[in-house]
Every structure is written in C-alpha cells, then in structure tokens.
Amino acid sequence: MLEYLYFSAKWCAPCRVLAPTMLEVSKTIPVKKIDIDENPQLASQWGIKSVPTVLALKDGVEIRRIIGVKPAGEYLTL
C-alpha cells in the first residue's frame, strides 16, 4: 500500500504553503502529517534534515523523498 509521511513544523512557512497541496493529495493517497517538534525521534529515525519533507512509502519502505514545496502533480506521480 502506498502512503505519504509529511514531515512539517508549525513555525515553517513553506510547510504552511504545502499544507493545502497535501490535503488535496490525501484525497487520493493516505497522508500522515508529522510535526518534527512533537515527534523528534520519528524525524530522526527517517533522517529528516529539513522541512517540509514528504516520504513516499510502499508497504513501509521508502521509495521516494521530496524535499521542499513542489506542485501537486509531483506528489501524485511516482
């Protein structure tokens, strides 16, 4: 199963810009939003160095990493 982990932070302006796009993507692909300040261990486990970062997972395995804000089509095309 394909899903996204969307790493963000409340203080991150680009994360706020990306939020509506990820909401739209979530209508097609499950998206789990993860605040790095509330979940630092999870961010560390996945090697998140900047936000926003979106990980595409297939059956729990990372198949793609998208860093920064991209157009919606970038998240819907794998």
Image: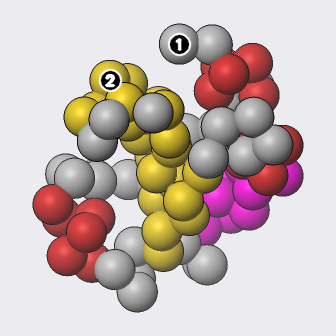
Q: CA distance from mark 2 to mark 1?
A: 9 Å
What secondary structure is found at the residue carrying circle 1?
Answer: loop
Residue at the extreme top of the image, as rendered: 78
Question: Which residue is under mark 1?
Answer: 78
Prevailing SS of the magenta stretch: helix
Quick check: 41 above or below 8? below
Residue 52 can be seen in this image? no
What secondary structure is found at the residue carrying circle 2?
Answer: strand
Quick check: 64 above or below 50? above
Crowdedness near tag 1: few (<14), some (14–19) or many (≥20) residues, C-alpha within 10 Å: few
Q: Residue at x 48, y 74 (%)?
A: 35
Question: Which residue is under mark 2?
Answer: 63
**Based on the displayed image, in which of its 4 quarters is residue 27 positioned?**
top right
Amino acid on which the number 1 mark rests in the picture: Leu
Provide the residue span drawn in magenta.
12-20
In percent of width and height, residue 65 lies at 38, 31
